[in-house]
Each structure stands twice: as structure tokens, then as C-alpha cells.
Amino acid sequence: MTASPAPPGPSSWIRRVRDLAREREAVLLAHNYQRPEVQEAADFVGDSLELSRKAAGVEGRVIVFCGVRFMAETAALLAPDKTVLLPDEGAGCPMADMLEAEDLVEWKKQYPGRPVVLYVNTSAAAKAEADLCCTSANADAVVASLPEEEILFGPDKNLAAWTQRRTAKRIIAWDGWCHVHQGILPRDVAAARTRHPGAVLWAHPECRPEVLDLADRVLSTGGMVREAAASAAADVIIATECGMLHRLRRDHPDKRFFPVKENALCPNMKKVTLPKIAVALETMAPRVTVPPEIAARARRAIERMIRL
Ligand code: 13P
Ligand code: SF4
């Protein structure tokens, strides 16, 4: 495979990436927070749960994961026969780094007998110490599926608090958070509501409880996509990472979607670019792999979630 000179604009880069994907028999999976041009180049765009499901059943030999490392690791766990590429090796998730496997081992010792529900925003090594994974789309169902009355839940304290509101069980939460969602404040909601009177507000459950209190709906990113198709609302304020706006605006040109604040951006999600995807496909690197002894245990926790 020979590298051609860099094409000039996004549409040429999209063509270049699509050509390379065809040559490599690669499937491009992109998270809803990816750059617009990356979403346009992808075969499938979705939330964490949808992308996990997709990775588990994908055709082709290669998965190019346009997202952050924990998502690519999950794809590697669910599709062990595929080569998984993460176009920027440094695309991590600071919230995932807040609960390492060693922390979890110590935490479990403090609460013997309690099952651990781990948000997918964690390393494979941490997942290997968990009983069951969840995403923001299924945390309620995952918690309800467990017979125990007390559950350890990490790393996101906001998703834990949101889940706690709708279960009689006791959720013991790790003190982690997403800096993008934690940075959305009630005063941002108030200002957005003043700018867009009459608009409804949908918030991601990684937002603070005080922000969720002000939302009309609390939804995962995939939930926002589905709600946009089902809802009669013409104007919607979105309280999550701004990449979400591209998908919603493209799918629903008849509606208006506004960011709750302009700079709710995840720098890690934005590290993936079309030129980096092209290089990844040309060089088949950087690859994401999970050591077999971790993979077997981490896969169990994810597959248990997918079966639900
Ligand atoms: P979703 O599962 O809703 O796509 O969220 C993933 C994420 O990283 C949110 O910050
Ligand atoms: Fe992690 Fe937050 Fe970025 Fe999602 S938006 S990948 S939780 S830092």
C-alpha cells in the first residue's frame, strides 16, 4: 500500500479514508462526540453501548475505533479475531483513569460481598475486577438485574447518583467524574434557557445532579438520537459534549439544536482526525490489544452487560 500525497479538503480526506478502509477490509466505528468529518467518514456512529454491540458483530478484518482508548479496548475484547486500531494512541478518558484496577481491588476489600458495577469508561484491567459493566444507556437495568441490595458503582459519581434516584438499592459510588460534563453548571443552563426561550433541555447523566434537576430529559448520547426522532420539540438545548450537535443537526435539519455552552468539548475525543485515520490504515498502527489474562475476565463483565 503506497501513501499518496495529502488531499486538500475534508471531502478528499473522507474519500481517501474510505478507499483505504476498503483495501484493508476495515470498518470505521465512531462515537457521537467525534469531529463532524470523522462521523461522516465512519461506517457507524453511536453511543458506547451501540458501538460495543456493533464491534461484537462487525464484518471485516479491521476495526478503526474513532473514539477513546477504553472504547477501542472494549472492541478488542468483543472482537478478539479483529485488528483494532486507535488512530491517536493518546486518546484516553481522564474519568477512566480515576479508577485503576489496583484502586478497585482495595475498594472491594472495604466492602466484601458487594458486587461491582463498572461504567464502561474504565480500563480493561479495571473491568477485569468488576462483576458487570454498564453504560449511561443501561445503568438502571444493570443495577436492577443484580440480586444484591448494596452495589459498588464507579467511577462516575454523577451517573451513580442519577441511577440511585431510580432504585431502592444502595449504591456506593466512587468519587470520579468527567471534566467535560462536570464543567456544565446550573448557571450555564440558566443562560442557555434565556438565550433560547421555549427550548427543551436534554442532559447526559454524567452532568452534575444540580444540572440534571434542570433538564427536561436525561439521556445517553444514543438516547438523544432516538429522542430527537420521537420528540415534537423544535428547539433543543443539549447539555453534553458539543460533538453531539453534528449528528442531531444532520439527522434533523427541521429542528434546532443548541449547545448548553460552546466549549463543552472533550479534547481526547477530538484527537482523532481524518489524516490520523489514514495513517493508521496505511501502517496498521497504533493497535489496541488486551493481555489474555485480563481479557478473559474483562470480557465476562462486558458480555454480561450485552446479554442484558
Ligand atoms: P455515551 O455512552 O452516552 O455515548 O457516553 C460516553 C461518554 O464518554 C460520555 O462522556
Ligand atoms: Fe471521558 Fe468525558 Fe471525554 Fe467521555 S467526554 S471520553 S467521559 S472525558
Image: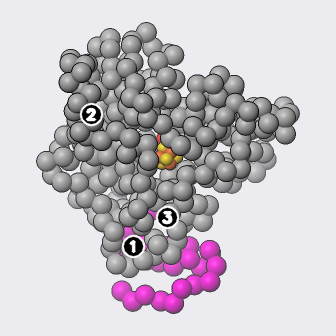
Residue 171 is situated, as x and y percent measured from the top left of the image, at 39, 18
Q: Nearer the viewer, residue 107 or 144?
A: 107
Q: What residue do we see at 52% from left, 71% from top?
A: 274
**Circle 3 residue:** 272
Amino acid on which the number 1 mark rests in the picture: Ala
Which is closer to the viewer, label 3 or label 2? 2
Residue 292 is situated, as x and y percent measured from the top left of the image, at 15, 51
Residue 137 located left or right of residue 281 = right
Residue 215 is situated, as x and y percent measured from the top left of the image, at 68, 27
- Give the structural element (helix, strand or loop) at label 2: helix
Counting residues from the start of the chain, the first of labels 1 and 3 encountered is 3
- Give the structural element (helix, strand or loop) at label 3: loop
Q: Nearer the viewer, residue 218 or 107?
A: 107
Q: What residue do we see at 71% from left, 41% from top?
A: 260
Counting residues from the start of the chain, the first of labels 3 and 2 encountered is 2
- Residue stretch rendered in magenta on the structure: 1-30
Amino acid on which the number 2 mark rests in the picture: Leu
- Give the structural element (helix, strand or loop) at label 1: helix
**Rounded to the nearest whole Å, what is the CA distance between mark 2 and mark 1?**
33 Å
Q: What residue do we see at 64% from left, 28% from top?
A: 211
**Circle 2 residue:** 104
Look at the image and tell me whether residue 69 can be seen.
yes
Q: What residue do we see at 24% from left, 45% from top?
A: 125
**Rounded to the nearest whole Å, what is the CA distance between mark 3 and mark 2?**
30 Å
Q: Residues within 10 Å of mark 2 (few under 14, many from 20)?
A: many
Which is closer to the viewer, label 2 or label 1? 2
Discs 2, 1 touching: Cβ within 8 Å = no
**Circle 1 residue:** 280
Discs 3, 2 touching: Cβ within 8 Å = no
Q: Residues within 10 Å of mark 3 (few under 14, many from 20)?
A: many
